[in-house]
Amino acid sequence: MKGAVFDLDGTLASTAKAHKIAWELSLKQLGFKLKIDMESLLGKRAMDIALFLIEKAGINDINQKNELAKRLLEIKSSIFAPYIMKYAEPMPCAIQLINTLKKNQVKILIVTSSLKITALKVLEKININPDILISGDDVIRGKPDPEPTILALEKSSLRPEDIIFAVGDTIYDIISFSEAKIKTIYLTNGDIRVPIDESLLKKYNAIKINSLCDILMKLQSLHFQ
């Protein structure tokens, strides 16, 4: 039984708009008017994003910052679902790729920096049911640390050499996959395109692709049905 590892937001699902709206409305509920640059949030765990936003809003006292970040994350989690249901969509070829892998007995491992409750809502909307889901609240150290990827391998009883490929849309994903000893790694364009230093791709042995459709076509050429 082989496996494939996927990031979620920006890789399997287009969710940037839903996240942006939910974060901005949550900040507003706390009395902060802050426009969010989603590029600066990509790949970060939800709690790390909350801390970053509270600091950006001008709160530097560590105790106050931690308390407000916790509250911000609670609000965001409570209001997020309707925006996911309205705006989230599968990324190009995501459904076809997952279905092709499942038909060929390949386990689907999703490793996301989002909270579990958030990730489950996204997966429900795009109608993908993974074999393993590791979220930001399952680990102590999120991506780019390899901990969440290693945990996904352990939970699926797979070794790095059993993974056909791993794919994400940020350098955080690529580093995590590489340091977990996965050999074939793809960096795809997410719903927010961020320039990536080519030397980093080379360092972490990652292949740049336009979309998941590139992987699907490669599998079809290898006679995956």
Image (cartoon, rainbow, N blue to C red):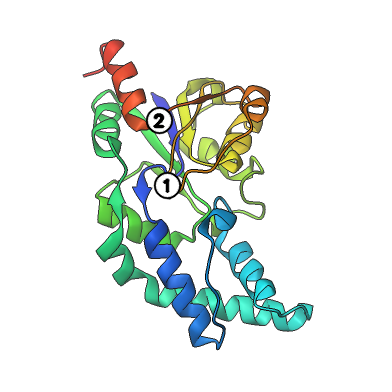
Circle 2 sits in a helix, a strand or a loop, which is it? loop
Residue located beneath label 2 in the image: 210
What is the crowding at mark 1: few (fewer than 14 residues within 10 Å), some, or many (at least 20)?
Answer: many
Q: Amino acid at mark 2?
A: Asn
- Residue at numbered disc 1: 10
Evaluate whether residue 75 shows in this view.
no
Which part of the image, by quadrant, shows the C terminus?
top left
Which is more foreground, mark 2 or mark 1? 2
Q: Earlier in the sequence, mark 2 or mark 1?
A: 1
Residue at (32%, 43%) from the top-left corner? 91
In front: 20, or 217? 20
Q: Give the Cα distance between marks 2 and 1.
A: 12 Å
* Amino acid of disc 1: Gly
Q: Position of residue 109 (x, y in %)?
A: 43, 39
**Position in image of residue 78 (x %, y %):** 41, 77
Residue plotted at (29% across, 71% down): 82
